[in-house]
Every structure is written in C-alpha cells, then in structure tokens.
Amino acid sequence: MENDNNVIRFFRRNFTSQLSKEDEKRIFTYFKRHKFEKKQLVFMSGDINTDHFFIENGLMRLFLIDKTGKEFNLLFANENQIIGDLITPEPTDFNLEAVEKTTAYSISERNFQELIQSLSLTHQSNPQNSLRRSYIKIQKRLVSILANTAEENYLEFRKTYPELIQRLPQYHIASYLGVSAEFLSKIIARTVKK
Amino acid sequence: MENDNNVIRFFRRNFTSQLSKEDEKRIFTYFKRHKFEKKQLVFMSGDINTDHFFIENGLMRLFLIDKTGKEFNLLFANENQIIGDLITPEPTDFNLEAVEKTTAYSISERNFQELIQSLSLTHQSNPQNSLRRSYIKIQKRLVSILANTAEENYLEFRKTYPELIQRLPQYHIASYLGVSAEFLSKIIARTVKK
DNA sequence: CCTTCTTCTTGAACTAGTTCAATTTTTATG
DNA sequence: CATAAAAATTGAACTAGTTCAAGAAGAAGG
C-alpha cells in the first residue's frame, strides 16, 4: 500500500486537508489490503461486525436478497469510494460482492472511529456531512422511484452515472432501479428508437 | 417554554446525559416556540435555510410535490421527535406541514451546530448515530417498497406505527407507501375480510 | 342539528411492469 | 479460435396498481 496514496487522498478530501507524515503512516496501519475476484462475495447477510471497504480499483455492489430469492442492489461503489453497511457491528442484512476484479482496503467500524478520533477530526463537520449527503441522496432516490416511471429513472441513472452504464451488466442496473431485467431491456430498445 | 422540559429530555436522550442548569438555560435560548394550525404549511419547496422543528405536541409531515402535482410523504414526526430537511441551508425540495394542530420549537441548522459545539458534544458519537439510524431506516424502506407488495407494506406500517394509523388520514399513509389512496382503500377492504 | 367540507369507498377501464420460456448476442476461457 | 457460459432480447399472458368518476360516510363549525 505504501506505493500509492489513494486512501490518504480520500482522507484529505473528506476529512481535513492537513495530514502530517505521521498521520499518513498511522492511516496506513489501519487498513488491510484485499483482492477480490469478479463475483466474489465479500460479506453476506447475517455476518456481524462487517468492514468498510475503500476501493482502490474495481467495482462493488451492496445488495439484499428478499424472501423469494430476488436480489436488490442498493449501492454501487467504484474507485476512491467507500462501501459497507452502516449497521455494523450489528449483523447485516446485506451482501457485498465484487462486480469486477477489485482491490480494496478494509477497516472495521471500531477502527475507523478510533482513527478519526486519533487524527483529531473531532470538529465533526465532515463525517457527518458525508453521511448527510448519502441520506439526501437515498431520500431523492426513494422519491424518484415512487414518482417517476422506470424509463425516466433509467435515463436519469444514465445521465448521472455514465461510467456505471458501461461497467455494470444491465440486470444489475435493473435491480438498482427496481425493475426486472427484461423490462429494462424493453425500455432500452424503446429509447434507442427515439 | 420554561415550564416544561421536553426539549431538554430530548437532548439528554440523544446527546449526553449530563447537562448543567447552565446548559439547560442555554438550550432554551436557542429554540423558538411556534403554534401551527391543522394543515398549516411551515416551509415549502424553494425556501432556503429552513429550520428544524422539535415537536412538543401534534404531528407534522415532510413531503414533496412532483411535476404532475402529486404529493409524496417522506416522513412523519410526532411528539418528541425532530423533523426538517437535512439539506439546509441549501434550498429545500420539500414542504413541511402540520397535519394536526401542532406546537413545535424551531432551530436553524447553524444554531443547532453551534449549540452542540458549545455543549461540547464534540465526541460526535451521537448526532452521527441518529443520522445513521435514519439512513438505515430509509434504506430499509426503499428495499421494502421495491421488494414487497403494497399490502405487505401497509401491514408492516400498521405494525410499526399503530398510533400513526389512528392519527393520519388514509391518503397520507397511501402517499407514504407509494400507492394511490383508492388502492389503499381497496387493500384495507380486502384485509378486513380476512 | 343542519350544512358544508373532508375523507373514504367502489367499480370500470386502463397501463406499467412482471413472469416465463425460448432465442440470440456477447463475453470469457481452455 | 472454438466452445461454453453469461447477458440481453423478444413475445405472450398475466397482475398489481392507476385513473377517473360518482356516491357514501364522517367530522367539524356556525
């Protein structure tokens, strides 16, 4: 991990801009590097004290499997993003999977908090703000799914995440939008004609 | 406000248990008391720097109006809960309305942060945690709306918020569940028979 | 207690989206 | 580069939920 500093940059961007060499070293020691194969499951429903994953390279998805066995994608994360279940250390309902071959750095909730504290990021402006942004985002998504048609939601998704459209199989996008893969395919066929 | 301490109790419960008399006085000075009539609009889409409202008595709803004029309820709050739009001080997309005659205490985001700081609630464990809980809740709601039928969602709502079933008109519940008022009425007729 | 307003109900016609099954296209791999 | 596996497409039959319209029931105020 020493030979790059994506995680450091992430910390600078999200928490505070002044990090001493000491701080950086300290940050390194908190993360563990992992490689996951395409479609490899990282954690699954029922697991406790799940880690957060900072993605250096690749693409992951957080999803849920309902009682009928159907999957629902909740979140995607790619390079320089963090993904995990906020309910940790409680048992998670979700599953985390690498969609592509992925390199990621893991940290437990407890260690994450400890790290933030020890860097005296106690002015709390930012860990809260990023959670706030996430909250506002999911709130918008909820409304959008309720208020708009699947076609509108798809077009919006495409506009917002053009690179994800390239990288994700369609059925994962369908599941994120809350429609069947078949129907999304029909939507796309329809919108291409226009 | 001096003759009761709902707000104080809220602070004790949500932030820290040790509050000096000084602290309590300080908290009082930050809040402004309001009374709202049934159906009175408190803030609306486009308003900037909207306040948070701590409800002493009554019931409020946060909702959005889509481009076709249809309303979507996002959140209800009753006694001893706080409601508002986290996007503040940015312009809100939402509307806040008193569903019943309501008494509430308002505070701006800026003052709220200042107050928390000045009470040295800097150990940040809790403002974050309550936001986390909200996030986890809305995440579950999103999945639930996608994965379950309207009937299942209604039964779940009824189980989780029995008192809201009493206090809210059906069409507000319908809008929260993401179905038309007519369809909810049919669902209820159906479930009564069983 | 009468009148008005608000909320709830019901039915009929409709539509967005699902499910299932079969086929084609694309991608990955020995 | 051939074969297998994964992903996308298409059509037909279906269903959950919508919309519109009209009427019934409930609640609230003068």
Image (cartoon, coloured by chain):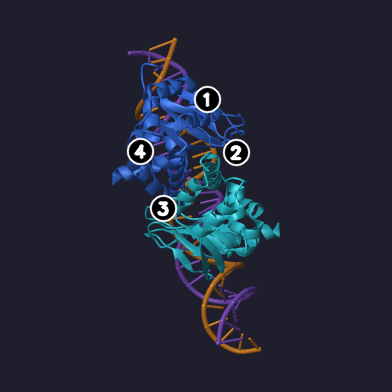
Chain colours: A blue, B cyan, C orange, D purple
Nearer mark to the viewer, of 1 and 2: 1
Kindly indicate whether the residue at mark 3 contacts the one at mark 4 (C-beta within 8 angstroms). Answer: no
Instruction: Note whether residue B179 is visible.
Output: no
Distance, label 4 to label 3, CA atoms, is 25 Å
Spot occupied by residue A121 in the image (x, y as percentages of width and height): 45, 34
Nearer mark to the viewer, of 2 and 3: 3
Mark 1 secondary-structure assignment: strand
Identified by mark 4, the residue type is Tyr
Mark nearer the N terminus (1 vs 2): 1
Distance, label 3 to label 1, CA atoms, is 38 Å
Nearer mark to the viewer, of 3 and 1: 3
Report the front residue among B168 and B98: B98
Are discs 4 and 1 located on one and the same chain?
A: yes
Q: Which residue is mark 3?
A: B88
Q: Which residue is mark 2?
A: A68
Distance, label 4 to label 1, CA atoms, is 24 Å
Identified by mark 2, the residue type is Thr
**Horizontally, is B41 left or right of B57 in the view?**
left
Are discs 3 and 1 located on one and the same chain?
A: no
Spot occupied by residue B62 in the image (x, y as percentages of width and height): 49, 58
The local crowd at label 2, few if under 14, some if 14 to 19, many if 20 or more residues have their Cα within 10 Å, is few
Q: Which residue is mark 1?
A: A41
- Name the residue: 45% across, 53% down: B111
Identified by mark 3, the residue type is Thr
Mark nearer the N terminus (2 vs 4): 2
Are discs 4 and 3 located on one and the same chain?
A: no
**Horizontally, is C25 left or right of D13 in the view?**
left
